[in-house]
Amino acid sequence: MFALAAVLTLCGVYPLALAVPPVWTQPEQIHIAYPGHPSSMVVTWVTQNKTASVVEYGVMGGKRFEFTAKGEATVFQDGGSEKRTMFMHTVILKGLKPAVSYVYHCGSDSGWSDLFYFRAMQEGVHWSPRFALFGDMGNENPQSLARLQKDTQVNMYDAILHIGDFAYDMNEDNARIGDEFMRQVESIAAYVPYMTCPGNHENAYNFSNYRYRFSMPGNTESLWYSWNIGPVHVISFSTEVYFYTEYGMDLLFRQYQWLQKDLEEASRPENRAQRPWIITMGHRPMYCSNRDGDDCTLFNSKVRTGFKDNSTVAPGLEDLFYSHGVDLMVWAHEHSYERLWPMYNYTIYNGSRHEPYTNPKAPVHIITGSAGCRERTDPFDPHYRPWSAYRSSDYGYARMQVFNSSHLYLEQVSDDQNGKTIDSMWLIKDKHGPEAWL
């Protein structure tokens, strides 16, 4: 081997260049998503040049790379001045055994990724899924990331919900900031399904960096979709259709019609009996008590009540969610944490004085948008709102576990206070659906 290397060097050929695949075909930015069926998982990654899309995987502790799955790559061109192109690879793994752990790597013979692992989703409805919830995390000052990495390494979550705003911003420096962010979150997103929704910081070039980088369920380019996990039906949607109407009001109406249909289906008695919890995730809140003039500080926020544009009336979402008995709405955008009392139309509907979250008569709103970014945290209005139960400007994120058909637990972790739980809530419901409000 050394003799061959010497000969090649004398001939002007450098063996190291032959031994290491060119960096532009090396997989990077690996992340996984749950497509909605326990026997499947989606693996997504990026290369800077065209190459095959292959995942080799096997049961942890068994024969490594026993199985092979192939997919395809989509060419993405960033809208910046350089018009950079990259290849977004997507492969669906099928035939997984529910709740079994797998080891995998992705790429091709032109370059393979590091070795990663994940646990296939459990099947059925009689188990207790665990989530991390946060929004607004950038590649600069991602303060909560190290703690989330440790949580992931000790197997604390079945899914991660990133509720909008990534990298700050993915399009900056001709999408290189997006690249760097996706490399950073690989430490959690390559191991646990990383489920997302778009935020305002993804708006550049018609949300193209977001739409191409993530592979969520459905056929709406990850802008809105739903999925089931244990006793929960999760709905992810775009609040941004209310603000970036230059991309077309038709998106707003298409999403609203989709939401109507999805909620009607999820609310059918036979479906609600199986999955009683309906939880929504959207970036910009309907309500908040921050002091920054954002939409949620307005009485008639666009997301809550809609708006009128000339003769066109854009419907809001509060009445739609309330009429279908949505249990919990999780938001971000405000760089803070806030837990609201159960509320509809600025009216508090606590279950009782001493147990406000036991059989409440309206949905519960949680804002957790302080994972950490270059814009730092947001201040609150010094005057408490009567519907604001708890609020904090600490950096941090939320954890949630849906124990069964009646009990849900949520807590907020402060990264500023070394992982201390600064707030918690048990949401207890004997009934779900609009009849729970009666």
Image (cartoon, helix red, strand yellow):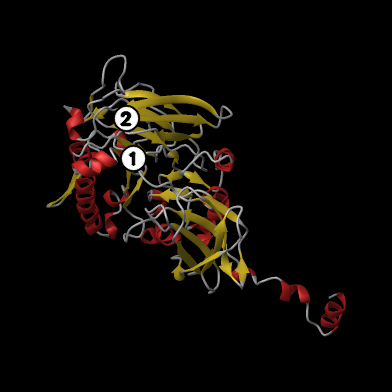
Pick the quarter of the image with the C terminus: top left
Q: Whole-percent x and y of residue 63? A: 61, 60
Residue 36's place in the image compared with 22, above or below, is: above
Specify the amino acid type for callout 1: Pro
Dot label at residue 406: 2
Pick the quarter of the image with the N terminus: bottom right
Q: Nearer the viewer, residue 270 or 104?
A: 270
Residue 370's place in the image compared with 205, above or below, is: above
Looking at marks 1 and 2 on the same chain, the residue that comes earlier in the sequence is marked by 1
Left or right: 149 in relation to 257: right
Q: Whole-percent x and y of residue 42? A: 45, 58
Q: Mark 1 — residue?
A: 231
Which class describes the residues within 10 Å of circle 1: few (<14), some (14-19), or many (20+)?
A: many
**Which secondary structure lies at badge 2?**
loop
Q: Nearer the viewer, residue 102 or 287?
A: 102
Query: Residue at left 59%, top 39%?
Result: 150
Specify the amino acid type for callout 2: Ser
Q: Whole-percent x and y of residue 256? A: 22, 50
Q: Quadrant of residue 428?
A: top left
In this orientation, does residue 267 appear? no
Q: Quadrant of residue 362?
A: top left
Left or right: 347 in relation to 213: left
Dot label at residue 359: none
Which class describes the residues within 10 Å of circle 2: few (<14), some (14-19), or many (20+)?
A: some
In this orientation, does residue 7 appear? yes
Q: What is the residue that sits farthest to the left in this orientation? A: 311
**Which secondary structure lies at badge 1?**
loop
Residue 151's place in the image compared with 214, above or below, is: above
Q: What is the residue that sits farthest to the top in this orientation? A: 354
Q: Whole-percent x and y of residue 140? A: 56, 46
